[in-house]
Amino acid sequence: MPPKPVDEAQPLAPDGAKARSPSGASRRGFSMSVVNFWLDTFLLVVVVVLGWVSAVLRIVFPKPTTADGWTLWGWTFDQWADVQFMCLCVLGLAVVIHVMLHWTWVCGVVSNQILKSKVRVEDPMKTIFGVGLLIVLLHVIAAGIIVSMYFIKHPPQ
């Protein structure tokens, strides 16, 4: 089989990886710096919206027990609370993606700076640690919800 043609404008790096332009962009036409910038911008927007909706629920509406019938722009307290929860879920997902993009750096800081380890952890193990951490965190959240459901008190009828 003949060798694949080499693009003269984009030579391969010595390690066989895709070469990057002086701006840091790969052959795909975007750099991870730009991806991180837009993800961070998205995180900022979600945090601002979440903060604003939370302030509306705390400041504009009366207490939830007396907010029945009150509306803001046609939405009830419960609908605004649903928007708040959706913003919180989107924020959580975006933070997970953000940490995933920086996972190698996180593992390096934990290994080298916090644990002072001289052992280099390979990428597959970093992935396993990340997935394991995510599973543990989801189980902690689920356990907290289950415990809360067990201890909730219903009003007398």
Image: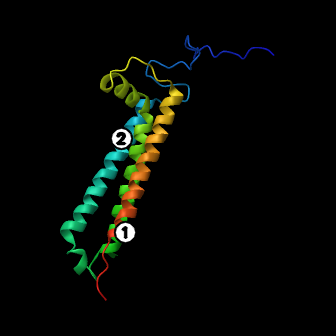
Q: Is residue 65 left or right of residue 1?
A: left
Mark 1 element type: helix
**Callout 2 amino acid:** Asp
**Callout 1 amino acid:** Tyr
> How is the structure coloured here?
rainbow
Q: Marks 2 and 1: which is nearer the front? A: 1
Residue 152 sits above or below residue 143 on the image: below
Q: Residue furthest right?
A: 1
Inspect this view and state whether residue 73 appears: no
Instruction: Report the front residue among 126 and 56.
Output: 126
Q: How crowded is the residue under tag 1: few (<14 C-alpha within 10 Å), some, or many (20+)?
A: few
Q: Earlier in the sequence, mark 2 or mark 1?
A: 2
Q: Residue at x 43, y 46 (%)?
A: 136
Q: Residue at x 35, y 46 (%)?
A: 43
Instruction: Report the front residue among 116 and 97.
Output: 116
Q: How crowded is the residue under tag 2: few (<14 C-alpha within 10 Å), some, or many (20+)?
A: some
Mark 2 element type: helix
In three-dimensional space, the C-alpha distance between marks 2 and 1, rounded to whole angstroms, equals 38 Å
Residue 101 x, y percent position in the rendering: 44, 35
Residue 53 x, y percent position in the rendering: 28, 62
Instruction: Report the front residue among 108 and 119.
Output: 119
For the residues labelled 2 and 1, say whether their Cβ atoms are less than 8 Å apart: no
Residue at mark 1: 150
Residue 83 sits above or below residue 125 on the image: below
Q: Residue furthest top?
A: 14
Residue at mark 2: 40
Quadrant position of the N terminus in the picture: top right
Displayed quadrant of residue 120: top left
